[in-house]
């Protein structure tokens, strides 16, 4: 299992969408943690993305996050990530 921490380096902060993309080539991590840029600086938010086999094993209450899961933060993160990708900010 490969877990990558992109809290400091994710979402365009290194010139690629994720920092690991500089070094891993076609290797895809199983889990990527992210925060900071996830909300575009509007609201504290954090989260993970993972492949299907891992996500299908996580049930409500099995996970936790300091800034994850609040409705406002999630709405802001959705718009921030969409803007980063659609507007070519990376």
Image (tube, rainbow, N blue to C red):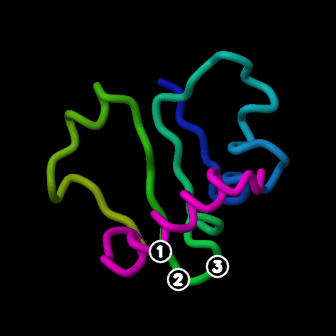
Tell me the tag on residue 76.
Answer: 1
- Quick one: SS at disc 3? loop
Mark 2 or 1, which is nearer the eye? 1
Main SS category, magenta section: helix
**Residue at screen point 61% across, 47% down:** 5
Label 1: few (<14), some (14–19) or many (≥20) C-alpha neighbours in 10 Å: some
Q: Is residue 7 left or right of residue 58?
A: right
- Give the answer, above or below, for where 61 lies relative to 16: below
Q: Position of residue 89 (x, y in %)?
A: 76, 56
Q: CA distance from mark 3 to mark 1?
A: 9 Å
Disc 3 and disc 2: Cα gap in Å?
6 Å
Q: Tags 2 and 1 in contact by the CB under 8 Å rule?
A: yes
> Seen from this angle, which residue lies furthest front?
87
The residues tagged by marks 2 and 1 sit, at their Cα atoms, a distance apart of 7 Å
Q: How many marks?
A: 3
Rendered image quadrant of residue 87: bottom right
* Nearest to N terminus: mark 3 or mark 1: 3
Residue hosting label 2: 43
Secondary-structure class at tag 1: helix
Residue 74 in percent (x, y) is at 39, 70
Q: Confirm or deny contact between disc 3 and disc 2 (CB under 8 A).
A: no
Instruction: Please identify the residue farthest to the top as the structure is shown.
Output: 26
Residue 19 sits above or below residue 66 on the image: above
Could you tell me which residue is drawn at 66 percent across and 58 percent down? 84
Which residues lie in the magenta part? Answer: 68-90
Q: Which residue is mark 3?
A: 41
Q: Position of residue 45 (x, y in %)?
A: 48, 72
* Position of residue 90 in the picture relative to residue 38 (left or right): right
């Amino acid at each position: 299992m490969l877990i990558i921490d992109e809290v400091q380096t994710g979402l365009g902060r290194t010139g690629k969408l994720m920092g690991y993309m500089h070094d891993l080539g076609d290797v895809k991590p199983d889990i990527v943690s992210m925060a900071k840029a996830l909300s575009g600086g509007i609201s504290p938010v954090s989260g993970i993305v993972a492949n299907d086999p891992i996500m299908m094993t996580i049930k409500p209450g099995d996970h936790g996050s300091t800034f994850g899961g609040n409705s406002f933060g999630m709405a802001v993160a959705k718009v921030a990530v969409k803007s980063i990708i659609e507007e070519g900010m990376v």
